[in-house]
Image (cartoon, coloured by chain):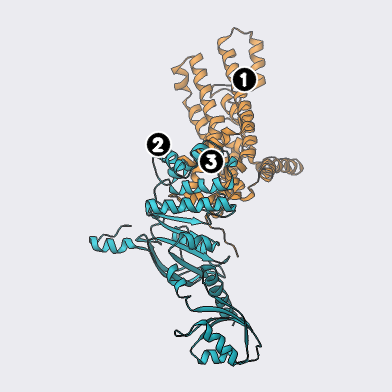
Amino acid sequence: MCKPSSNQTKWKVLSLVLLDLQNLSRHFGQVQALREVTLRLETGTIGLVGNNGAGKSTLLKILLGLLPPSSGSGTILGCDIRQTGLKLRGRIGYMPEAAATVPLLKGVEYVALSGDLYGMPFRDARRRAHEVLNYVGLGELRYRRLDEYSAGNLQRLKLAAALVHDPELLLLDEPTNGLDPAGRLSMLRLLEDLIAETGKSLILCTHLLKDVERMCTQVVVLHQGTIAKSGPIEEMTRAAENRYEVHWRDASSDFLSRFRSSGGTVLHQSELSEALVALPETWQAKQLFELAAQCGTVITRLREDDDDLERLFMRLTAKETKGTQD
Amino acid sequence: MISIARVALIQVLRRKTYWVLLGLGLAQFIMFWSVIYALTQLQLPDQVKQNILREFGFSAQMDEQRDNGYMVFMERQSVVVMILLAFSGSLLVGSDFRQRTLPFYLSRRIAKRHYIAGKLLAVSSLILFLTVIPALALFVEYGAFTSGLTYWRDNWRILVAVLAYGGVLCLVNSVWLVSLSAYLQRAAPIAIIWSSLLIMPGRLGEYLWKASDNEYWRLLDPWRDMRLIGQLFFGKFRKDFDRGLAWWGLLLISAITIVAFIALVRRVRAVDVVE
């Protein structure tokens, strides 16, 4: 059974948990796409980010029940991912990254087909297709053939096809891929409205970290098949307070070692004369300048680390790559 | 499954060039319909009737020496079917792979088997519309213009044979075409390979048959094998030797169809492994 059979309290607790994965792995022959992924996420809007080949698509396909994990277990929307593939898909709306069009079909037929395939009766699917096409702003274009849709409208159409059966969870794979800035903005606005109005959960799989920052409250950073970091975006970016990106001249000085002995932390050093540092709690920026002066070092640039997701991501993936190479 | 088949048929019917082929099929049906009408309703001299019968090789009775007219009709229609299929494989199946529509289908509440069954049903429907249904219409027409219930009752085996032969055509051609389209995907390669499969082995078989005087080489011609299977159902063979060949043909066609089906099942998947 997909729904929990015990008491109401348990149901409430479970309903908050969107997905819970335990040591999930998946390999394709020699290629290890996912390694021992353990992840617990609550309902809401979640960004799934990672480089190409990080395992995002594999994770999405496992969540959809299209691919069984090689090992490990997990639940999504309270359903076991190993056993409830078809039932589970009825509760999820998936928008693929690829064009995924059916030649010669009209927009409304495409969305109705999606409803049919989700198990809706033909008439209901057709009626809902009209409704969701109006909702995503394609009401006027519904009788056009798919090859006449622009890239932006095609993305909206695919969103409509994912929404047609009113799913609890939306899995969107690169929804703003290939859109011009105006189209991207318009798509994001549509998604924001949708989430605000319906309260649906959303997993947004994308390379565009700005989109995740704007849309999501939680993020999962995948790197080389493992979870590099996951959690609320706000918490991750809050941790950036009192951090600075510092560039200096005279690399021969003992500036960094004295900084460390004063209680500071060097988070990341990309070059000999530049680093990302976290100041001791009681320090302010001027104390860093004072320390540099004592060491005979000239700070050429000091920039508050307004850590956005992009910088966090770059650091996480760079660190991980270095660690792996080591 | 039904919705996949319905959409596939909508796709075919929206392409105008396919209407030309459907029109050819219809023209052939009208021709046979007219022959039956002329033979049964018009007061024609015997010589003219004989000429018509010779021209069309037509017989509407099971126990006559001539080829069975319904079988002849279905054979001729299958030429149109083969051309239609050669050009529709890319549209019905190839595009799903080219445009990566498979994840769209398979991420819905359907399994791989539903997708495959839907596509096979769509192709089978095309074959059915062009062969079985018009053949049944001719059967009804002949009975209606002659002795009615008596004709239909006395020749019930024709009905069974039409359905059985049609079933073989639908099953074999749909599995072959869908499998081929799933691998080749684009219209030109599908059309070339499809035509070659139906022509080249036949030519080779005929050459080897003439060179070695061994009739079994003719089994290399899949089209002829299907015809022999049809003759098995209609119970009429042009040569006695063909009766034995028909069973071998059935075995060969079944084996190829099973292999093609396994290849199709392996090819249809929602996830492409990228290394």
Q: Which residue is mark 2?
A: A123
Mark nearest the camera among 3 and 2 is 2
Mark sitting on residue B171: 3
Say if residue A232 shows up in the picture: no
Determine whether the residue tagged by mark 2 lies in a helix, strand or loop. Answer: helix
In-image side of B251 versus A16 (left or right): right
Say what amino acid the circle numbered 1 marks: Met
Badge 1 crowding class, 10 Å Cα cut-off, few under 14, some 14 to 19, many 20 or more, is: some
Report the amino acid beneath label 3.
Leu
Residue A5: where, in percent of width, then height? Answer: 26, 59
> What's the amino acid at mark 2?
Arg
Q: Colour of chain A?
A: cyan
Work out whether disc 1 and disc 3 sit on a shared chain. yes
Q: Secondary structure at mark 3?
A: helix
Neighbourhood count class around disc 2 (C-alpha, 10 Å): few under 14, some 14–19, many 20 upward:
few
What is the CA distance from the residue labelled 3 to the residue labelled 2?
31 Å
